[in-house]
């Protein structure tokens, strides 16, 4: 099996062209997945996850959400990376960032390669951003890994009506277990199409093998669940 094709593309926004990366599966078409970056940007880890999703038959678009500030990815393995990343994220205007991500989803929907539905997958910063996008734009599915902004967006939970999958570690340094329970209660209230999984002993960013908090067991299990969820809820040719 050949690797997915990777292209550089741009997404039209209210203020110009946002750089983005596109992965097209071997068959040339498929359902679409908008992949939203961690706080470190479109890093090698995010690009690898994009390839993994495209290898499952999906057309994957990963926009450079930091394009207004500095799109260069941050090396998450370097000393001080988290402080640099939080500083960069702090320069973003959240409503503008959400609009940029919505434009990316709309762009993906309109691409000739996309046949079928379009979903959103987000990690960390992107997990919370994806939740906000799902409330605004109604993708066909949402997968959120430890969405860091979700605790502050629970008033929008009833607006996220797409089938969704959430992953949270119960040893998260940034999202306490009690807060995870509050998130679970809010996102599952009145919505039967929510899969919510927690992972004992797993910290924040447990899926990122380039980061110090990586948890191999939680990562493998969450990814298995993610692939199964996407194939069930967002079938692709």
Image (cartoon, helix red, strand yellow):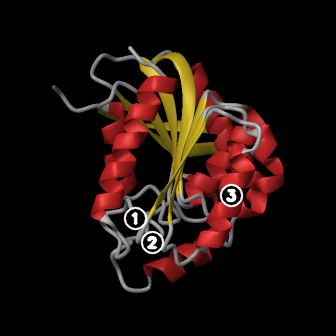
Per the model, the C-alpha gap separating discs 2 and 3 is 16 Å
CA separation in Å, label 2 and label 1: 6 Å
Give x and y (percent) for residue 170.
Answer: 50, 68
Q: Secondary structure at mark 2?
A: loop
> Which quadrant does the N terminus fall into?
top left
Q: Nearer the viewer, mark 1 or mark 3?
A: 3
Residue found at the very far bottom of the displayed protein: 79
Question: Cβ–Cβ below 8 Å for labels 2 and 3?
Answer: no
Say which label, 1 or 3, has the lower sequence index.
3
Which of the marked residues, 2 or 3, is nearer the chain's N terminus? 3
Residue closer to the observer: 118 or 10? 118
Q: Which residue is mark 1?
A: 206
Residue shown at 69% from the left, 39% from the top: 134
The residue indicated by pointer 3 is 183
Marks 2,1: beta carbons within 8 A? yes
**Where 140 falls versus 87 (above or below)?**
above
Q: Give x and y (percent) for residue 189.
A: 75, 44
Q: How many marks?
A: 3
| Quarter of the rendering occupied by the C terminus | top left
Residue depicted at x 39% and y 59% = 43
């Amino acid at each position: 099996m050949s690797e997915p094709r990777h292209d550089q593309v741009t997404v039209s926004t209210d203020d110009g062209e946002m750089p983005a990366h596109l992965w097209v599966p071997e068959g040339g078409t498929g359902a679409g997945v908008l992949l939203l970056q961690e706080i470190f940007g479109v890093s090698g880890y995010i690009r690898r996850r994009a390839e993994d999703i495209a290898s499952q038959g999906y057309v994957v678009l990963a926009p450079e959400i930091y394009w207004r500030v500095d799109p260069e990815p941050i090396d998450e393995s370097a000393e001080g990376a988290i402080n640099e990343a939080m500083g960069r994220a702090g320069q973003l205007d959240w409503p503008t960032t959400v609009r940029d991500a919505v434009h990316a989803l709309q762009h993906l929907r309109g691409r000739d390669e996309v046949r079928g539905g379009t979903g959103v997958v987000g990690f960390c910063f992107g997990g919370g951003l994806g939740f906000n996008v799902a409330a605004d734009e109604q993708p066909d599915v949402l997968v959120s890994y430890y969405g860091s902004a979700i605790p502050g967006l629970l008033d929008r939970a009833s607006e996220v009506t797409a089938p969704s999958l959430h992953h949270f570690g119960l040893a998260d340094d940034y999202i306490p277990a009690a807060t995870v329970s509050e998130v679970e209660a809010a996102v599952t209230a009145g919505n039967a199409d929510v899969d919510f999984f927690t992972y004992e002993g797993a910290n924040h960013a447990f899926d990122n093998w380039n980061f110090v908090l990586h948890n191999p067991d939680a990562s493998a299990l969450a990814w298995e669940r993610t692939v199964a969820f996407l194939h069930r809820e967002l079938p692709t040719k």
